[in-house]
Image: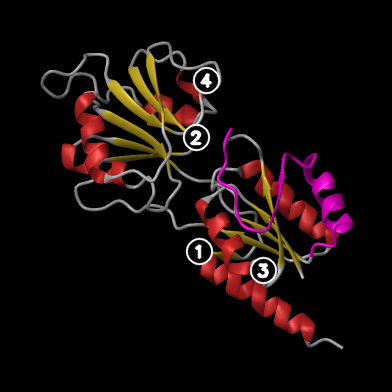
């Protein structure tokens, strides 16, 4: 049995470790991170050339099932995966960590895009706490791509990403290159040291980057949260690597019983 994991996430690496070597596993990474953490099994890096290219690769390499374990905001590859799996007539499963849920004391603004997140900054963080800049100081943790939405904002930004962001970026910004998981104490210190009064993040879910939400709650800082796009219609979803692995191994067992 050959499983193609569209990966790059912590969950994708965990899933590859659970399946290898019981099945043949190929993990596909987009190649957008300079030094990715490689999973167990076979690895390919780079795009497929859209849905048609992915469908062709599935057929050429005798893939039996595809797992979309990409980042919750990798909307294009998820859409291409659904089209390609349907074209190649192979099962597709989406592995998605649960999204974050606001707790008592949180001050969240729910938005649908980065452009909406930028617009939501109006009236937030502009000197509402003693000693803060009247222009606001924003901790931006939406990744290195898509920062053009904030390029014309007047606020000062602390931009955190794994690799250096792509232009255009906010005009008044400091870039912090770092990779999770992050600790609560570290996030508290980051907010304090940079005098942050607004946090902007995507609802990526999971525990690795969640401490910033707790730190913001403790500090009374408003959080602008970009909603994740939905999984393509009709695609089943597993919420943990263990659940996804169990489904794959069950499929393998069923196929083995077919004469």
**Residue sitting at x 25%, y 26%:** 196
Q: Nearer the viewer, mark 2 or mark 3?
A: 3
Q: How far, Cα to Cα, is label 4 from label 2?
A: 12 Å
Q: Quadrant of residue 122?
A: top left
- The residue under label 3 is 21
Q: How far, Cα to Cα, is label 1 from label 4?
A: 32 Å
Question: Element type at marker 3?
Answer: loop
**Residue sitting at x 67%, y 68%:** 21
Tell me, yes or no, whether the highlighted magenta stretch contains residue 61.
Answer: yes
- The residue under label 4 is 148
- The residue under label 1 is 239
Q: Quadrant of the C terminus?
A: bottom right
In x, y percent, where is residue 136? 27, 19
Give the mark nearer the N terminus: 3 vs 4: 3
Q: Which residues are magenta?
A: 34-63
Q: Nearer the viewer, mark 2 or mark 1?
A: 1
Q: How far, Cα to Cα, is label 2 from label 3?
A: 40 Å
Nearest the viewer among 17 and 161 is 17
145 vs 67: above or below: above
């Amino acid at each position: 049995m050959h499983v193609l994991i569209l990966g790059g996430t912590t969950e994708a690496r965990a899933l590859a470790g659970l399946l290898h070597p019981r099945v043949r596993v190929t993990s596909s990474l987009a190649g957008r991170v300079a030094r990715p953490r490689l999973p167990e099994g076979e690895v390919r890096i780079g795009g497929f050339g859209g849905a048609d290219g992915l469908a062709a690769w599935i057929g050429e390499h005798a893939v039996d099932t595809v797992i979309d374990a990409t980042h919750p905001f990798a909307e294009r590859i998820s859409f291409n995966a659904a089209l390609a799996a349907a074209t190649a007539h192979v099962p597709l499963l989406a592995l998605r960590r649960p999204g974050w849920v606001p707790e008592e004391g949180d001050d969240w603004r729910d938005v649908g895009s980065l452009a909406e997140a930028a617009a939501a900054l109006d009236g937030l963080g502009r000197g509402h706490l003693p000693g803060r800049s009247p222009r606001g100081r924003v901790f931006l943790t939406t990744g290195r791509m898509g920062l053009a939405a904030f390029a014309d904002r007047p606020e000062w930004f602390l931009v955190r990403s794994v690799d250096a962001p792509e232009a255009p970026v906010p005009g008044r910004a400091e870039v912090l290159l770092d990779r999770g998981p992050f600790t609560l104490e570290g996030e508290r210190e980051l907010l304090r040291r940079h005098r942050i009064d607004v946090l902007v993040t995507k609802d990526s879910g999971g525990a690795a980057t969640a401490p910033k939400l707790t730190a913001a709650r403790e500090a009374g800082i408003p959080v602008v949260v970009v909603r994740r796009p939905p999984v393509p219609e009709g695609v089943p979803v597993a919420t943990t690597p263990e659940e996804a692995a169990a489904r794959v191994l069950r499929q393998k067992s069923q196929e083995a019983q077919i004469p």
